[in-house]
Image (cartoon, grey):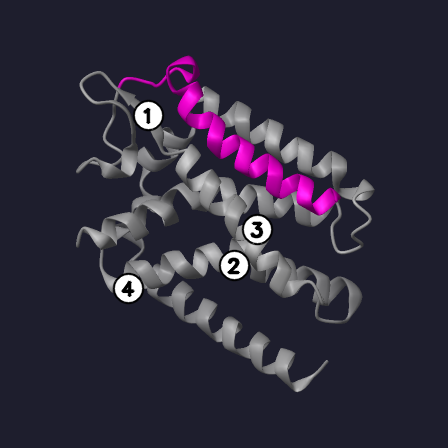
Amino acid sequence: MSDFFVHYLLAWSAACLLALGIFIVRFKTWDITQRRYWQFMAQPWKIVTFSIAAGGLMVIAPYTGDMTWDYYDAAFMSALTFTTAPWAVGVLYKATQRQRSLLAVYVALCAWMFSASWSYDLYLLLRDGAYPATWDVNIAASSVLYLAAGLLWNLEYDKDKGVVFAFMRQNWFAPQAKTGFAKIFLYALPFMLIASVAILSFVW
């Protein structure tokens, strides 16, 4: 492994360990550790769209011609994206409104990068014994998927404002009337198309 990859691996490993330490020390303060976040994510339409997306990725993985992509990284990257992207994207938005700290931004960015890139790099390094040559291409493609997923699963219908992103509310995960998918379908469609194009780019 070249010096560049050794240094890159050490740098992001240290970044993740620091983020994990901050996360543990302030465990009870994070939105993602609250029960209401998981209730927010457990809405039927979110579970269904996640299942379709993850299942599709796992099915096409062996047929892409990309030897770095298999059932395992398709599965764990999908799971990491579903569980963290709505939170991480929301934290970054709220930070622009001065409603989240720089520490929260740092942890959210590490969650983003680990989910979309570094977990992939680590898995392939352990599987193949070499750092993947596709590490940089994967950052771009997987980050598009991550952002689209984070926005998609934050969509909700508000009877006064119409379709909005949940993270724009002051009480982000406060219980709301459950959003039916029919009410947000047209707004969800662009994010699903973006994700589909990103996935098909792997096949191509």
Question: At x 51% / y 48%, what residue is drawn?
Answer: 144
As measured in the structure, the alpha-carbon distance from the residue carrying label 3 to the one carrying label 2 is 11 Å
- From the top left corner, tell me how far across and down residue 101 is, in percent: 22, 60
- Please tell me in which quadrant of the rendered image residue 78 appears: top right
User: Which circle, 3 or 2, is nearer the viewer?
Assistant: 3
Q: Quadrant of residue 7?
A: bottom right
- Spatial CA distance of label 1 from label 2 is 27 Å
Query: Please, what is the three-letter code of the amino acid marked with disc 2?
Result: Phe
The overriding secondary structure of the stretch rendered in magenta is helix
Say above or below: 4 vs 76: below
Q: Which mark is residue 103?
A: 4
Q: What's the magenta region? A: 177-204
Judged from the image, the secondary structure of the residue bearing numbered disc 2 is helix
Q: Are marks 3 and 2 in contact (CB under 8 Å)?
A: no
Point out the tag, 3 or 1, that comes first from the N-terminus: 3
The residue identified by callout 2 is: 114
Earlier residue among tags 3 and 4: 4
Q: Are marks 3 and 4 in contact (CB under 8 Å)?
A: no
Q: Which mark is residue 156?
A: 1
Residue 88: give x, y in percent of width and height. 38, 49
First in sequence, mark 2 or 4: give its number.
4
Identify the residue shown where x is 28% and y is 39%.
167
The amino acid at mark 3 is: Ser
Looking at marks 1 and 2 on the same chain, the residue that comes earlier in the sequence is marked by: 2
Q: Is residue 75 left or right of residue 30?
A: right
Residue type for callout 1: Glu
Q: Residue 34's image quarter?
A: top left
In the image, which disc is placed on residue 142?
A: 3
